[in-house]
Image (cartoon, rainbow, N blue to C red):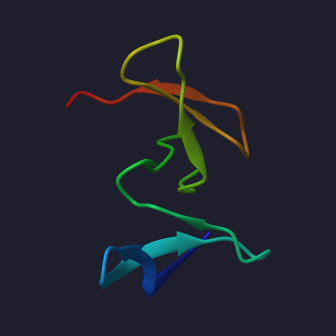
């Protein structure tokens, strides 16, 4: 994942976001950095509140709001 400026649209405004090598853009509000491998390519698990899973190493971790 690469940190890129002006890649995520919020109405008429643009904000920074994470972008993978294939061009997919992730809103930084919906992803967290994996504490095990350091990438930001993670997603929230719908079945476990506050729990994220890394798409690279599959590590699951909890983020306290």
As drawn, 56 above or below 22: above
Figure quadrant of residue 11: bottom left
In the image, residue 27 lies at what x, y percent? 44, 61
Q: Give 23 or 2, whichever is nearer the viewer.
A: 23
Position of the C terminus by quadrant = top left
In the image, residue 55 lies at what x, y percent? 70, 42
Query: Residue at left 53%, top 56%?
Result: 40
Position of 29 with respect to 31 (left or right) is left
Query: Residue at left 57%, top 44%?
Result: 42
Task: Determine the residue located farthest toward the front in the rendered image.
Answer: 11
As drawn, 15 above or below 58: below
Q: Give 48 or 58, whichever is nearer the viewer.
A: 48
Position of 26 with respect to 58 (left or right) is left
Figure quadrant of residue 14: bottom left
Position of 49 with respect to 20 (left or right) is left
In the image, residue 63 lies at what x, y percent? 33, 30
Position of the N terminus by quadrant = bottom right
Q: Total marks drawn?
A: 0
């Amino acid at each position: 994942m690469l940190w890129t400026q002006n890649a995520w649209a919020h109405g008429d405004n643009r904000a920074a976001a994470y972008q993978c090598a294939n061009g997919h853009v992730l809103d930084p509000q919906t992803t967290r950095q994996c504490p095990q491998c350091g990438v930001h390519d993670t997603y929230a698990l719908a079945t476990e509140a506050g729990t994220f899973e890394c798409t690279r190493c599959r590590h699951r971790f909890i983020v306290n709001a």
